[in-house]
Amino acid sequence: MVGEQCFSAQIADLHFTFQCQDSRIFLDRQGSIQAYCIDGDVENSDYLFSYAVRSVIDLFDYQLTFRGEPISNDFLNYSWYVYTLGEKVAIRVEFKDHSEIKSVLAEFEKGKTQVKISLVLKTDCHKAVRLDPLMHPLGSLLMLYLVQEKQGLLIHASAIEDGGQGILFTGVSGIGKSTMARLWGECGACVLNDDRLVLRLFDREVRLYNNPMPYYKQAPKQSILKKIFLLKQSPLNYIQPLKGVQAYSRVLGNFIQQFYEPAMVKKHLDIAEEIIAKVAVYEVGFKPDTDIVRMMREMDRYE
């Protein structure tokens, strides 16, 4: 029998508390969020997640606002939907081949701390379900929407810290984000992540964070973002500064943008504009060797 469960995690300088009193759910704190867990109390939480099993999901009063593209991968096959009712939001994920879970629903109200998560189990599931509190893809969607309330965005990118400054590398899929992070790691830099980062806007700076990933563990890391590099594969190494509209438009397409209403899109664009205005942006063409690391480090001598 699973008893009452309650623990906290700090992700992107935000305090999350996860609670469950349902004996049919075992919250797995040894999974993706293990290294993010902290000692904390409910009163200090930015967001409080609660979990329960339901027999059905009733969204009768809600309006379907956004239908996510069905995504297939090596791990799960699912479809997801966003519903709204005034300031209330519901995210529903339907799993097509999960061994235990038929669907999951997250309900929250804009500007509030409570996030209620309900699971519908398959009829032949008669045991407690081991659940990652930020199970994919629900956790990724919640991070996207909740972080925006805290002046934050998610971006497909890799990032490192070198000499006390955070450097982010982004571009289209397959362009070399992981390769660039590896090259910097070989040269002694600290690799923050090579897939997905959180950027949060503060008065005088932009902070860069890794965050729990669905299928592997990592220690929490952060830095102050100083440079963004847009990657290009090239037979020659080069670095070209980008300014103004050109910098904004080139970086913008790499942010994760699965929003369900125009107001969220506008806020996203405003935050992105402020972030890009606070950091230096460059295009970098590179060969996959450490010469590009040396070249990028030498930039600081002339700035």
Image (spheres, rainbow, N blue to C red):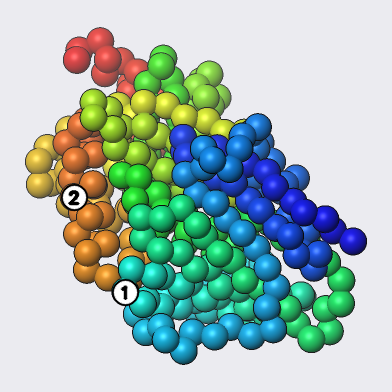
Q: Name the mark nearer the viewer: 1 or 2.
A: 1
Q: Is residue 264 above or below residue 143?
A: below
Please name the residue shown 40% across and 34% down the image: 208
140, above or below 64, in the image = above
- Circle 1: residue type: Gly
- N-terminal-most mark, 1 or 2: 1
Q: Residue at x 52, y 76 (%)?
A: 92
Image quadrant occupied by the C terminus: top left
Residue underneath mark 2: 270
Residue most extreme to the top: 301
Q: Is residue 129 left or right of residue 265?
A: right
Q: Horizontal and vertical percent for residue 196?
A: 47, 47
Q: Are marks 1 and 2 in contact (CB under 8 Å)?
A: no
Give the numbered dot on residue 256.
none
Report x, y in % for residue 54.
Answer: 68, 78
Q: Quadrant of residue 69?
A: bottom left
Q: Secondary structure under badge 2? A: helix
Q: Compared with residue 269, is residue 167 higher up or lower down, i.e. above or below?
A: above
Residue 173 sits above or below residue 200 on the image: below
Mark 1 lies on residue: 86
Q: Of all residues shown, which one is farthest toward the bottom?
A: 60
Amino acid of disc 2: Asp
Q: CA distance from mark 1 to mark 2?
A: 23 Å
Decide if residue 180 is in sight here: no
Residue 27 placed where, x, y %? 73, 55
Q: Position of residue 158 (x, y in %)?
A: 44, 40
Q: Residue at x 39, y 70 (%)?
A: 88
Which secondary structure, mark 1? loop
Q: Residue furthest right?
A: 1
